[in-house]
Image: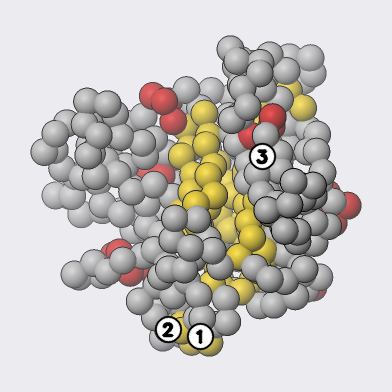
Amino acid sequence: MARHPLRSPSARRDRRLAAMVAALLLGLGGLASGLAAAGAIAEDDPAPVDAPAAPSITPAPEPCSGEPPASGPCPQCTTDVPGASPYQNSLPVPSPLPGFNYVVQLVNESAATLLAGANAAHRGNASVGGPIPPPIAVLPREGTWVMQPKGAPNFGNVLTIDIPPGWEGTQCPQTNPACGADGPRFFARTGCKYDIEHNLAQCETGSCGDAYDCGQQALRDPPLASAGRAPLTIVEWTFNSQGGQGYVYPDISLVDGVSITADVQALGRHCASKPGAPTEPNWLSQNQPLAMHGVDLASPTAACRASASPAARSAR
């Protein structure tokens, strides 16, 4: 499960997405238990002077600013996360570090040790043929990508990732649909043997060039792919989209196959509905849960959630 605070409303895949926080929940396919992970993202060393600078983006508005009933641009704010388990409600809720607008928390709710992974995302260029900003790798606040099983001491199954400003606004504009952007992606690797000191890891699912830190692959010369190898369940995010309006859109992608069950949920105080669209079925808070686990999905009576499912949460 992954969670993080967000400033703007967003959608969710497993558990909850709250104002200033977003979460991502992940679970192992075929297991009754789930995976939850959270991580903090920090920008890499400053880019060389001759590197193309990331285009500026409007800071995201605070959707639920002030004390209730004040709610900023949101018609209604809430802290409710339908279906959240007592365990999920007991997890710490992070806030973004200074200089960051979003934070994602990954939570492993399975009985297995997992390696989390994230690509080195970056924006594109609105101008056709313009320079593309360099990739930005991140590292969880905990200083590791290892996610201990659920119930580990000191929340060792949780990682916290602060989202760099360069990971915001990664959608391509209509004027340049092939802008070269690479949006944020989170995933869990299963069945891993790893050597952190030498940046090595071999996993049954999700390996990224046999590296322990997937994002660092994109910073090599020549760069290597930082995304995990299929089959792999991927949770994608667009932060502060639509020209800096603050909208946050998570998505669970199975185009590369399925390796685990995953979900996203809001954290903290967040928009109960999309501003200007009180009945938006694609809005995270109005579309929970995003995933179904532990049942035959072909069944018309399939339950919507399992008590031990994995999750990802985010907040702003």
Nearest the viewer among 219 and 229 is 229
Q: N-terminal of the two: label 3 or label 1?
A: 3
Q: Which x, y percent locates residue 123?
A: 31, 42
Q: Residues within 10 Å of mark 1 (few under 14, many from 20)?
A: some
**Looking at the rendering, in which quadrant would you find the C terminus?**
top right
What residue sits 47% from the left and 22% below the top? 245
- Quarter of the image where one finds residue 39: bottom right
The residue carrying mark 2 is 200
**Looking at the rendering, in which quadrant would you find the N terminus?**
bottom right
- Residue 23 appears in the picture as rendered: no
Taking the image as shown, residue 284 lies to the left or right of residue 208, namely right
What residue sits 44% from the left and 55% below the top? 255
**Are the two marked residues, 2 and 1, in contact with CB atoms closer than 8 angstroms?**
yes
Nearest the viewer among 283 and 101 is 283
Nearest the viewer among 34 and 105 is 34
The residue carrying mark 3 is 17
The residue carrying mark 1 is 194
What residue sits 31% from the left and 66% below the top? 225
Work out how far the residue at label 3 is from the one at label 2, CA to CA, in angstroms: 33 Å
Say which mark, if any, is on residue 303.
Answer: none
Work out how far the residue at label 3 is from the one at label 1, CA to CA, in angstroms: 31 Å
Classify 70 as above or below 156: above
- Quarter of the image where one finds residue 176: top left
